[in-house]
Image: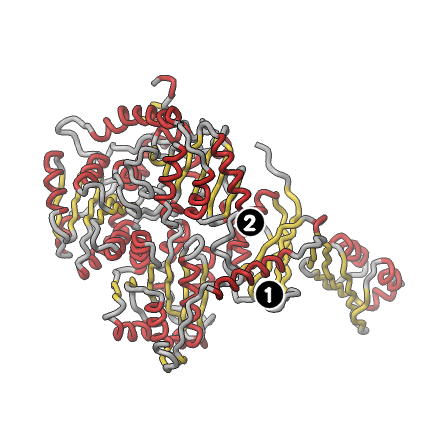
């Protein structure tokens, strides 16, 4: 039997904003021994509805089951499975480097311009550089800064929006609104 | 507008909310963090019966028995910490077997949450993965809405267990009483709109099929679809196989019912699964005990999968058409689109294989020579006969369970109560208590092994206290029989930790004031069964069983479903018969 190919998937989960939601979702990955690469949680464009974005390496049949099991949770409104082609996505990274080394290297302008980064804070001791981009772009800058004795590096979870012209969550909520209306008429 | 705007405690609001949801029975066990609720229950004993079990695990299994026999939501109340931890097995069991429960756990006061306070445990964190919904209530005024939501979630869609973890100060705090049942949750749709186009394609596929086979799961029972199922399969002459939990959804005597599926299922079904050209799976989930090796499962069949839970689609077996719907609604809508058909030859082909099973397996199990030890099958079929096949059979887990599934016969729906998905030893005794309490007018027979009986044996105290007229049959082989069977077949007969030195069960029962008798000889069996069934009091039969008795046919785990052992060394080869 051949094993399906593993690839990086992005899962987005729209849910009620309730305590323990992340736990409900993450245990579904744990059960199948799937490592969550990164995660971000925030408000969505819809009032009171939260959005989780997670990425994980897995095969498609497994992830299709995972997403259905996530969606089965009562507090989850909708869950979606994407590969990178389906979405526009970014991450944010912060880099803290010694200011003296940065200035000695004479590369500030190159960093800002070539890597599309910006200086967030500069003190005599350290400088914090911020960059948002694709994972390989934040890594390219990380490699560029390694020679400068980088002190701290952190990157956020992925944030993503779909390329689809259709907003499926809105459609679901509209269906549910009509269902409620029918129930109330009864 | 009854009881409006009264100032009451959270504890009273909980009790009143349970009454609003038409609960009549609660299974539970008191303790520190749930004391305010127990204090209030004292005022409501005329309206809400509390059954004091002897261990919290027993409370959940009893509530499961209650729910499975009646179709209503079972209610459990326990305390925090150890009380809550003791309900975990039952919750996991109810989740696997889609059983509607509302389990209320006491919790330490708000200011102690997260501090490792006395008898604090993270109930919501622990139970989230094994419940349909787990929710902590921290304020008295949130209790009525939380209970309404809990009952709605537990009982709708694919039913399941719900936990309400109620902090002690929420029980003590005051609120203005108001109750509003829930029938809508934005993030949850328990009754999806049926895809009529998919249904039409399914009907077409069934009409064209030469060898269709319908697999009936517990979804048939839950949606009360037995009659709808009967009408459909009679019209189109479609043979039916029940999953373990689907048993009793059709009467055993139904001409299109060809038996049970799976590891210890009936021969015709397991052989013909791989010959069917269309499989219609309704309210079942292709458990590995049903499919055997999925890579070789039903290679010739297109699969129509009808289930209320879309996460079951393509989980273990890929379907050609998946229909997310309530089983009865789907079957009723299919019926007019299904053409009347004559598939007698196909239906009879199941009977031919089953006849071999009857000759080889049934004969060995039911027709032993005089003077030999009793077998499980003959005890179960005798009890079934003596009840006119009208009793509720509750089982524990293991050989007693498989033998009951095979040899008990069913006339009415909701007559087979067993732990399927989780396979929980110790389930039987407390589940039988709940079943009898839910259906006092029915005869409830428990079939249990000597091992499982001792896992929850303390519930004999509950039977004593409430006079629950359960007819208990211990199929006693002084072995953990099912493990012994596997050791016999697959582990070179090395009986590691399966022989068991047992107490005198009749003496134990007698200490609880429960009558009973030992049965050793075949000639004493019928009389003992008659005495057991003579009145409505609890009774225990401790039947000495041949320890070499094994459950056959058997598809060994992971094998193709049609690789069936009829006896330890004898694989069934259809051509030889």
Is residue B466 visible to us here? Answer: yes
Quarter holding residue B490: top left
Identify which residue is drawn at 72% across, 53% down: A163
Residue B569 in view (yes/no) = no
Residue beneath the point at 77% across and 64% down: A130
Please tell me whether residue B482 is drawn above or below residue A68 in the rendered image.
Answer: above
* Front-most of residues A20 and B291: B291
Q: Position of residue B295 (x, y in %)?
A: 51, 32
The residue beneath circle 1 is A49
Q: Position of residue A91 (x, y in %)?
A: 72, 59
Q: Is residue B457 left or right of residue A79?
A: left
- Position of the C terminus of chain B by quadrant: top left
Residue B169 position (above or below residue A163):
below
- The colour mode here is secondary structure
Mark 1: secondary structure = strand
Residue A66: mark in rendering = 2
Residue B506, x across and y down, in percent: 14, 48
Subunit bearing disc 1? A
Left or right of residue A104, residue B532 in this image: left
Disc count in the image? Answer: 2
Q: Which of pointers 2 and 1 lies earlier in the amino acid sequence? A: 1
Name which quarter of the figure residue A21 lies in: bottom right
Is label 2 or label 1 in front? 1
Q: Name the chain under label 2.
A: A
CA gap between label 2 and label 1 equals 21 Å
Check whether the beta carbons of the residues at disc 2 and disc 1 lie within 8 A of each other.
no
What is the x, y in percent for residue B550?
28, 33
Q: Residue at x 33, y 54 (%)?
A: B71
Q: Is residue B35 above or below residue B230?
A: below
* Crowd around label 2: few <14 · some 14–19 · many ≥20 (10 Å): many
Q: Secondary structure at mark 2?
A: helix
**Do the residues at pointers 2 and 1 share their chain?**
yes
């Amino acid at each position: 039997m051949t094993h399906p190919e593993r690839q990086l998937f992005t899962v987005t989960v729209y849910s009620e904003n309730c305590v323990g939601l992340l736990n409900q979702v993450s245990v579904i990955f744990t059960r199948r021994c799937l490592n969550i690469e990164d995660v971000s949680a925030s408000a969505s464009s819809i009032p009171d509805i939260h959005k989780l974005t997670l990425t994980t390496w897995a095969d498609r049949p497994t992830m299709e089951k995972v997403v259905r099991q996530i969606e089965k949770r009562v507090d989850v409104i909708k869950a979606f499975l994407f590969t990178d082609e389906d979405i526009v996505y970014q991450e944010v990274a912060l880099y803290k480097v010694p200011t003296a080394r940065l200035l000695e290297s004479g590369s500030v302008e190159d960093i800002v311009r070539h890597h599309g980064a910006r200086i967030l804070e500069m003190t005599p001791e350290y400088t914090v550089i911020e960059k948002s981009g694709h994972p390989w772009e934040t890594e390219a800058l990380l490699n560029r800064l390694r020679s400068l004795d980088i002190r701290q590096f952190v990157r956020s979870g992925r944030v993503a929006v779909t390329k689809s012209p259709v907003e499926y969550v809105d459609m679901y909520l509209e269906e549910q609104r009509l269902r409620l209306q029918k129930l109330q008429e009864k | 507008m009854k009881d409006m705007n009264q100032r009451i405690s959270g504890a009273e609001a909980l009790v009143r909310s349970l009454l609003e949801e038409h609960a009549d029975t609660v299974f539970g066990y008191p303790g520190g963090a749930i004391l305010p609720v127990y204090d209030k229950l004292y005022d409501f004993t005329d309206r809400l019966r509390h059954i004091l079990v002897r261990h919290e695990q027993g409370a959940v299994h009893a509530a499961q028995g209650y729910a499975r026999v009646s179709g209503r939501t079972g209610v459990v109340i326990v305390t925090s910490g150890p009380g809550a931890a003791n309900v975990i097995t039952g919750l996991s069991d109810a989740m696997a077997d889609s059983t509607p429960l509302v389990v209320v756990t006491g919790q330490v006061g708000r200011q102690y949450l997260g501090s490792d306070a006395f008898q604090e445990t993270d109930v919501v964190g622990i139970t989230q993965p094994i419940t349909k919904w787990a929710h902590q209530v921290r304020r008295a005024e949130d209790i009525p809405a939380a209970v309404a939501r809990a009952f709605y979630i537990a009982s709708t869609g694919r039913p399941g267990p719900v936990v309400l973890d109620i902090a002690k100060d929420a029980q003590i705090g005051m609120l203005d009483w108001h109750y509003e049942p829930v029938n809508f949750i934005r993030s949850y749709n328990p009754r999806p709109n049926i895809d009529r186009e998919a249904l039409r394609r399914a009907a077409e596929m069934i009409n064209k099929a030469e060898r269709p086979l319908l697999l009936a799961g517990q979804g048939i029972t839950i949606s009360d679809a037995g009659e709808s199922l009967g009408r459909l399969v009679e019209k189109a002459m479609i043979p039916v196989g029940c999953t373990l939990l689907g048993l009793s959804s059709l009467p055993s005597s139904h001409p299109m019912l060809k038996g049970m599926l799976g590891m210890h299922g009936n021969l015709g079904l397991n052989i013909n699964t791989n010959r069917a050209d269309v499989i219609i799976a309704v309210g079942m989930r292709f458990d590995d005990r049903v499919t055997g090796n999925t890579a070789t499962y039903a290679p010739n069949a297109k699969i129509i999968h009808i289930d209320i839970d879309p996460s079951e689609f393509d989980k273990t077996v890929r379907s050609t058409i998946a229909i997310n719907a309530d089983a009865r609604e789907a079957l009723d809508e299919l019926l007019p689109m299904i053409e009347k058909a004559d598939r007698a030859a196909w239906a009879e082909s199941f009977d031919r294989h089953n006849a071999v099973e009857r000759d080889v397996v049934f004969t060995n199990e039911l027709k032993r020579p005089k003077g030999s030890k009793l077998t499980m099958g003959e005890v179960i079929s005798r009890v079934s006969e003596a009840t006119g096949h009208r009793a509720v059979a509750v089982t524990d887990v293991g050989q007693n369970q498989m033998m009951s599934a095979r040899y008990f016969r069913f006339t009415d729906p909701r007559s087979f109560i067993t732990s399927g998905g989780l396979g929980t030893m110790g389930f039987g005794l407390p589940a039988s208590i709940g079943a009898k309490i839910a259906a006092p007018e029915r005869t409830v027979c428990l079939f249990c092994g000597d091992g499982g009986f001792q896992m929850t044996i303390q519930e004999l105290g509950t039977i004593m206290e409430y006079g629950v007229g359960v007819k208990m049959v211990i199929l006693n082989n002084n072995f953990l029989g099912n493990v012994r069977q596997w050791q016999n077949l697959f582990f070179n007969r090395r009986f590691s930790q399966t022989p068991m030195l047992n107490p005198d069960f009749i003496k134990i029962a007698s200490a609880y004031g429960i009558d009973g008798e030992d049965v050793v000889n075949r000639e004493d069996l019928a009389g003992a069964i008659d005495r057991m069934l003579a009145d409505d009091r609890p009774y225990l039969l401790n039947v000495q069983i041949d320890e070499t008795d094994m459950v056959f046919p058997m598809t060994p785990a992971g094998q193709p479903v049609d690789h069936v052992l009829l006896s330890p060394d004898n694989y069934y080869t259809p051509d030889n018969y």
